[in-house]
Amino acid sequence: MLLKRNWSVIWIAIALVVFAAGCKKKAAPPPPPPPPPKQEAAPPPPAAPDISEFSAEPSTIERGQSSTLRWTVTNANQITIDNGVGSVQASGSRSVYPNETTTYTLRAAGPGGALSKSATVTVTAPPPPPPPPAKPNLTERISALQDAYFDYDKSDIRDDARATLTKDADLLKAIFQDFPDAVITIEGHCDERGSAEYNLGLGDRRSTSAKDFLVQLGVAGDKLKTISYGKERPVCTESTEDCWQRCRHVHFSAGQ
Amino acid sequence: MNKKLIFATLAALLFAIPVTTWAQDNTVIIKLVGSQKPVMAVPDLRGSGTTQNFMGAFNDTLFGDLQNSGLFTMAPKGMYPLQVPQRPEDFRQPARPGESMGGLALADWASPPVSANFLATGYTAEQNGQIVLYGWLFDVGQPNLANAQILGKRYFGSGDEAGARSVAHQFAADILAHWGGISLYGTKIYFVSNRTGHKEIWSMDPDGSNQKQLTSFKSISIMPAISPDGSKLAFTSFASGNPAIFILSTETGRRLPFYNQRASLNATPDFTPDGKQILYASSASGYAQIYVANLDGSNLRRISSSRAIEVEPKVNPKTGNDIVFVSGRTGPQQIFRMNFDGTGVERLTNGEGEASNPSWNPNGEVMAFAWTRGFATGNFNIFLMDVASRDFNQLTHSEGRNENPSWAPDGRHLVFMSTRSGTHQIYTMLADGTQVHQLTSAGNNQTPVWGKAPNF
């Protein structure tokens, strides 16, 4: 085999020399051609390139994660992968971080031809990050507490007030869990009709009744203060049943 | 007792209304105001030299004090004779009885059209930069000057308008004293005003002049009470958080220490008649109840004991042993009475409507208070009640809300709050409901209390 190839090389070399000589000088007539060498079988054509493997693993990633491309190519002297990977060796692997779904194409070229193969990395959006750690506002939490309303000259907890304060109790427990140092004041208010002096006492009863009810529902009593404003801080001043009802209430505020 | 009966019958005849209702009511007023008033003539006095410049203020003050006392019927000035005797020497004895001397005879003032019983006269002069008043009072029904002169006295004041007003007040006070009346000169009305944007305690003279701000906590300061000697002011304030009792010296304007017991509410203070203790309402044991303590808050004890709101304790100024107060123990707020140890509780108002704001007359027999009896809830009017008999009488009628009556030291006048002008303002009136004067107009003003001025 080696010998055979050497012969063919020699023959080619001779041919080239003769050809070159012929180009150069058109002088003497050429000698008769030598007898052709003994022709044996023609050399086999070069083998076609082969991509035995080109894969992306995992084929589905979340944005920001990596996928590994793996390939094995034979019979190729020029191997490239597009999308920024560039020229590669015949076999290898490479991590890629595509931001969006990307199809990578490997092209292999050699004496025996060219070939390409594709692998797709599917990119999914990751779940949103958790909100930044809560910077919660105590004032807002307190303002979410609902006022409870009373009948004229009464400090009993009515049915509607019972429902309201039951919701407030849950909110209060949550507030005190998040703000262990918080103190919340229950303000008792009255409408304009009774005397200012008596209403101070009545507002005091209303705030105390509301506090007792909340404590029964498990709210920490030592975190609840009471204060009566009597009829000194009305939410409205019209002499109407509607305004009077709005004035007969307990209201929550930040404690001193 | 006899006198009371006579007056009652008289009133009944006068108004021709069934004795059983009206006469009963009116005894409360007659006791305080009387029915037969002497007729008083007070001509405009004149001043010599520069003092004449202040005689307008002087004459207004003298006439006003005498008229506003409610003790007299004032003879109208337009009916007076042309000549006014300025001193005893000016009087002339008519040659024949009934002959007019143009004002210089006693009888000229006693006979029609003046028909006065008494004549107050005199003049002012300047003396060493001061104003001096020579004032006389004559009983013009007497046959001769020697018997007629009741009062003859000199009064001194600073040589300006304030001095002229001062000598007029002093002269009027001496005239009132002759009928057992007490001058309101030297008294103060303490009240609450929001004219600065916050409810603060203010003071003013009984005619509404000289209004001064006493506190500036920029909080809610309300419900003042004045000590019997006028030296201390107690009130309820939110200045330190929960409503608490504050004591102020009216002489220095400084806060005096008071121990507020641990409670969500300490409020509605008042002084005992000896000025040594303070009664107030406290929620220390749950419901607001009546407590008593020393002036600094020490040695406190609970007086009332009920499961009801109880506020506004007021000790009887005569006995020192009766306390009237407001309680919800029988339902809507009513006025009750009890002994100083909390025993002997009885309801004074009959359970109708809502009653509040009791104020003892200095005589310890009559109280003024606010009551909605006969009106819609919240529609208070001023009433008087004879506490022993529980006879009562209504003084204000259908003119807005009328609340917080407080007796003047003379026991004949009341100061109170009314919304009759559309805003909360302070008024005075005589105990029969007449002579109503509005004293305030700036902002809203309420809960007046009438007492002595400090150092007077």
Image (cartoon, coloured by chain):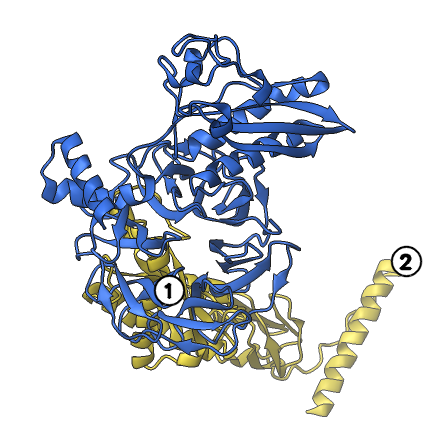
For residue A132, side relative to residue B405 (left or right): right
* Chain letter for the blue part: B
Residue A170 against residue B386 in the figure, above or below: below
* Circle 1 residue: B319
> As shown in the figure, which amino acid type bears the numbered disc 1?
Thr
For residue A130, side relative to residue A37 (left or right): left
Residue B270 against residue B436 in the figure, above or below: below
- Residue B324 at what x, y percent from top left? 32, 62
Residues B373 and B11: in front is B11
Q: Residues within 10 Å of mark 2 (few under 14, many from 20)?
A: few
Residues B443 and B453: in front is B453
Q: Do dots 1 and 2 share one subunit? A: no
The colour chain A appears in is yellow
> As shown in the figure, which amino acid type bears the numbered disc 2?
Ala
Extreme-front residue of the structure:
B95
Q: Residue at x 43, y 72 (%)?
A: B292
CA–CA distance between discs 1 and 2?
A: 164 Å
* Circle 2 residue: A27
The answer to whether residue A90 of the structure is visible from this angle is yes
Q: Chain of mark 2?
A: A
Give the label, 1 or 2, closer to the camera: 1
For residue A21, side relative to residue B75 (left or right): right
Q: Residue at x 31, y 38 (%)?
A: B34
The answer to whether residue A146 of the structure is visible from this angle is no
Q: Are marks 1 and 2 in contact (CB under 8 Å)?
A: no
Which secondary structure, mark 2?
A: loop
What is the total number of numbered labels drawn onto the structure image? 2
